Image (tube, rainbow, N blue to C red):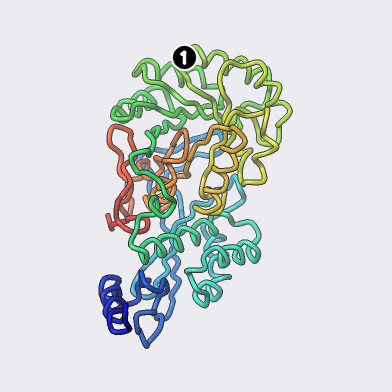
Amino acid sequence: MNRRDLMRALGAACALSGPGFPSPALGRTGACGDASGPSESRLETEIVRLKLRHTWTTTMSSSDFRDTLHVRLVRDGVTGHGEGAPIIRYKENAAGAKEAVLSVRDLVTGSDPWQFEKLLGEIFRRVPGQYAAKAALDITLMDWVGQKLGVPLYRFFGLDPSDARITTFSIGIDTPEVTRQKVREAQAFPVLKIKVGLDTDDATIAAVRSATNKPLRVDANEGWKDKEVAVRKINWLATQGVEFVEQPMPAEMLEETRWVRERVRLPLIADEACQRARDIPKLLGIFDGVNVKLDKAGGILEAFKMIQIARALGLKTMLGCMVSSSVSVTAAAHLSPLVDYADLDGNLLIANDPFAGVQVRNGKLLLPDRPGLGLNPA
């Protein structure tokens, strides 16, 4: 190829990629003769109040709304969206998450988002705790990168969207009458997740079973403090069509949970006991699997690492979520082809979702094929 042919080929590549997009030939923004270089970056934050369809009750709290932090990175004509859903269990709230993001705003806007691994490493170094805030920034960057590359995030990770899992639909703790109503509303979902952990557990399961015979997964949210009570309840749940039990005892009671696991007939999945990658090795022999959540891990990249580590150690993997909008839930859903189980319904529990992203048909997650997260305004 002579110089004239080379220049023609580069011109065609630039025309396909468009101004400010990565050049297929040169692999960097602005390489197609954009003399102006990258545009100014802007990082925006907003606390969004999500209104729940039903009062959401677990062993930890009861609420009619949740506040989440939304983040937007505007650069080179593309807006990346992110969300973090902080909860009191981890001593986080939306105001604190916003403050954490603003503390590194100059770092984010002054850095090259293509070097997201390096940038996120520096964010993790500078910001103590505040993992929901870190998740919001991570999701924002990955959405921006996916859009600039022109590919959905599942393709960025080399995943097949047809492998996306069936998600459970969660039933919060309530009166038997309202529990039955919630079960009826979840008719389209083939598997339900039932919140337990209180003295009303027997009545809750009885109400569910009076309305459906679907497979159940149970989450105690650290509610059982006595190991003998936990054994009795879990072995009874094994007779009720339950597939596994999530976090039966408080996260710090690992030896008690080991004792329980040796005496029960159902697999145990760690949630609160497994917040980040470093927690996984110590759970071997105590739990059969781990529930990975972006807001605990600090984003998509950290969640991806956790899933790979857990799989390498022979543990089952599950992707969960907080009550959040389609931003956070869709971000997690892009990783769902990697895991054994999915509990990605946080956006389905709210009445004012500002975005549309991942969809659900007969319980199966349908990943958007648009670039990045693939979000559209609701």
- The residue that appears at 40% across and 75% down in the rendered structure is 29
- The residue that appears at 35% across and 84% down in the rendered structure is 33
The disc labelled 1 sits on which kind of residue? Gln
The quadrant holding residue 377 is: bottom left
Give the percent coordinates (x, y) of residue 89. 59, 44
Residue 117 vs 246, above or below: the answer is below
Residue 53 vs 207, above or below: the answer is below
Question: Which residue, as the protein is rendered here, is positioned at the far front?
Answer: 1
Secondary structure at badge 1 equals helix
Mark count: 1
In this rendering, would 185 be left or right of 193? left
In this rendering, would 74 be left or right of 277? left
Q: Considering depth in this image, is 237 or 181 the residue closer to the camera? A: 237
The quadrant holding residue 286 is: top right
Q: Which residue is the site of mark 1?
A: 240
Q: Considering depth in this image, is 325 or 126 the residue closer to the camera? A: 126
In this rendering, would 9 be left or right of 197? left
Residue 1 vs 79, above or below: the answer is below
The quadrant holding residue 99 is: bottom right
| Viewport quadrant of the N terminus | bottom left
Give the percent coordinates (x, y) of residue 363. 33, 33
Give the percent coordinates (x, y) of residue 138. 50, 59
- The residue that appears at 35% across and 29% down in the rendered structure is 182
